[in-house]
Image (cartoon, rainbow, N blue to C red):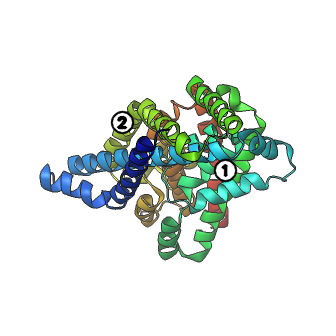
Amino acid sequence: MEEKKRIRLIVAVAVVLPALICLYYFLPQIVDLFTYDLLGLSSGSHLGTSVNFFFYDTVKILILLFLISSLMGVVNAYFPIDRLRNYLTTKKMYGLQYFFASLFGAITPFCSCSSIPLFIGFVKGGIPLGVTFAFLITSPLVNEVAVAMFLGVFGVKATLIYAASGIFMGTVGGFILGKFKLERYLSDWVKQIQAQSEIETEKWEGEKTPFIDRLPSIIRDGWDIVRKVLVYVLIGIAIGAAMHGYVPEDFFAGYLSADRWYAMPLAVLAGVPMYANAAGIVPVIQVFVAKGVPLGTAIAFMMAVVGLSLPEATLLKKVMTWKLIGIFFGTISLFIILLGYLFNFIL
């Protein structure tokens, strides 16, 4: 690469990267200013809440998708994909790979849709699908903010059970889904970027291409991923925004009482179409419990809302076939129902 092009590229990266990080950090304030001051919408209205949610989550996910895709491009360029994949698939780790992926998901502050960019990065990097599922399951269910809120509202025992069960579900769910050999149900687009990533890595390794010469291709690939999933992001977040703004918090509370045999399956089925992060749903769970809903049923509802949602399914459609999405949602829904019954028995 010519020296002038190298300098321009370095300057562009040095400017754009900090700008994106600053935008991500100040995004809530920027979106509030745009929604409530410039557009004049009321912060207490359904429309204002939905519009604010749409712009915030859309920009947040696109920034994450670009940064994580580019980061994974750097990782793929310098760490042999086939070696990592072979290590995870051939070494006897006794399930620890699923546990570590689930634990990593627990410490990342992502909702179900925000977890998708990292999930795509894992898949692109050749990480086994079961391990990526372990991350995807736990990441929206457990995070430090939700744990702190849960602790303050429901106490130590309920919090430990909630956090441990989220990590347990990710570990076991990832292990089981990994045994199904579901890679054939990934979308053609994902298979294409996997193959392209391997070809580029082999070429760069063979030619010993310096990092600065690899960077344009890495950034281009990251932007290409953003461009290809943009429609899915917009549709998914629009669905989530409508549900976030217009579905009343206590809409389902009357149907989830302890004396109804169908309360637990209904809690999970009712939670799937909705969309919220774990921290945002804890106050709703508090309302449920105050209205007489058993804590285990309320937690099951919470897990379904944050771990499985229609917006998440819409985003995953770019990555998976509908059959794989159905297997993933069905398996996790069954786990949540069983855990909900266990929670009611314990708590």
Q: Relative to 151, say whether 28 is above or below.
A: above
Q: Which residue is mark 2?
A: 234
Question: Residue 177 appears in which quarter of the rendering?
Answer: top right
Could you tell me residue 186's position as x and y percent?
62, 29
- Residue farthest to the front, as pictured: 3
Q: Residues within 10 Å of mark 1 (few under 14, many from 20)?
A: some
Residue 300 is at least partly visible in this image: no
| 252, 99: nearer the viewer | 99
Q: Relative to 138, say whether 236 is above or below.
A: above
Could you tell me residue 222's position as x and y percent?
48, 39
Q: Residue at x 59, y 23 (%)?
A: 188
C-alpha gap between disc 1 and disc 2: 33 Å
Q: Relative to 195, say whether 239 is above or below.
A: below
- Name the residue type under label 2: Leu
Could you tell me residue 316's position as x and y percent?
52, 35
Question: Residue 80 appears in which quarter of the rendering?
Answer: top right
Q: Which mark is residue 329?
A: none
- Residue farthest to the right, as pictured: 92
Q: Which mark is residue 338?
A: 1
